[in-house]
Image (spheres, rainbow, N blue to C red):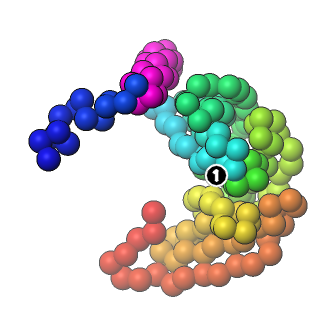
Amino acid sequence: MSAILGTKFLFATAAGVIASKRLLAVAAAIAMWATLQSGAVSAQTGGVGGDGYTRMMWRGTDGSISLWKLDPSLNSVGAHDYGPYPGYSPIAMTTAGSNLSYVLWNYTDGTADVWQVDANLNFVLSNNFGPVVGWTAEGLGSDSSGNIRLLWKSTQGSFSVWTLNPASLNSIAQISFAYYFGWTPP
């Protein structure tokens, strides 16, 4: 039990030391890049594709995004920058088991735009949804069948999940949940 409390326990293997050094190097590079940017910078992992590679999204202070691809050892193997696009804000990213990633953008009028990017983060296609009065698209996910889930939240606190076909990005199902007093969706 006392070994668990020590930080050396986390780096017990040679592979663990190498992986932690690479992660530290990535974190240091990110910290240096963030100090050069004015305002808040945030990142989100899109998940791990079926190929074992992690895709992640950085949101720039100017509304642009930088999509990164990391190999299983967390080495950077590719990146693409997109934007900024007037009126659009990047919201979320998810990666499916097919190695395709999806990026959610919101427009100032409430329109949600979902992009599909290939395994190497190249833009493939997009589809717009809305605007839907009183609703804002707030997140993306993928299910075990490879479908994309577009998450909406209403100004009244209700929550809706739209299932999108991963190839066409067309809506194939929708379900809504009423507001539950004392509970708020993320």
Residue found at x 45% / y 63%: 186
Q: Is residue 64 visible from the viewing direction of this image? A: no
Residue found at x 77% / y 35%: 120
Task: Please provide the residue range marked out in magenta.
Answer: 15-38
Residue found at x 87% / y 61%: 168
5 left or right, relative to 49: left
Give the residue furthest to the left.
2
Query: Is residue 24 shown in magenta?
Result: yes
Name the spot of residue 135 as percent of width and height, x first.
Answer: 61, 68
Q: Amino acid at mark 1?
A: Thr
Residue found at x 86% / y 59%: 167
- Classify 130 as above or below 121: below
Please, what secondary structure does the residue beneath circle 1 have? strand
| Quarter location, residue 141 | bottom right
Q: Is residue 155 visible from the viewing direction of this image? A: yes
Name the spot of residue 162 as percent of width and height, x first.
Answer: 69, 72
